[in-house]
Amino acid sequence: MPAYILSIVEITNPGPNLKKYTEESARLARLHGGKYVVRGKSANVVSGDLLSKKVVVMLEFPSMDNLNAFFHSDEYQKGCKPLREGTGIYDIGFFESPPPSLA
């Protein structure tokens, strides 16, 4: 069953480490079967103001095991994640795909 990681990010310091982080995290996600569903700012915020200055990133993985393998890997936790420190505020959650009857 597919699993998703959703990140809502307020970028506060778009320096060179942010570019390195986005490139490296994308590479690692692909290694674990991840693919981007959404990546960027909203084209049109139609209600509320939560998303007005945020970037939304959603990746789909083949399973929660793949997602966890990506996020909890030493390569991500020790080599990639530190690159994002000081670049923004990151709110991140993991989600499972709804059962077929609710999709």
Image (cartoon, grey):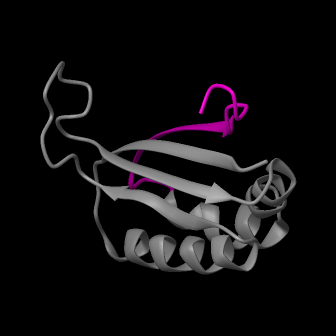
Residue found 75% across the figure and 60% down from its top: 62
Q: Position of residue 45 (x, y in %)?
A: 15, 34
Name which residue lies at 38% across and 44% down: 9
Let me know if residue 77 is in the magenta part: no
Asked whether 24 or 6 is in front, the reply is: 6
Q: Give x and y (percent) for residue 102.
A: 63, 25
Q: Residue at x 75, y 66 (%)?
A: 78
* Image position of 30 (left or right of 48): right
- Give the residues in magenta: 85-103
- Among the 4 quarters of the image, the one containing residue 10: top left
Which one is nearer the viewer's eye here, 42 or 52?
42
Q: Is residue 101 magenta?
A: yes
- Kindly identify the residue that appears in the image at 28 percent across and 49 percent down: 12
Assign the C terminus to one quadrant of the image: top right
User: Which of the two residues, 94 or 86, is positioned nearer the viewer here?
Assistant: 94
Picture layout, residue 29 above or below residue 27? above
User: In terms of image quadrants, where is residue 98?
Assistant: top right
> Left or right: 31 with respect to 86?
right
The spot of residue 7 in percent (x, y) is 49, 44
| Residue 47 left/right relative to 92 | left
| Residue that protrudes farthest toward the front in the picture | 101
Whether 66 is drawn above or below 50: the answer is: below
Relative depth, front residue between 101 and 54: 101
Count of residue discs:
0
Q: Is residue 28 above or below residue 12?
A: below
Q: Position of residue 66 (x, y in %)?
A: 81, 60
Q: Above or below — where is 39 with respect to 3?
A: below
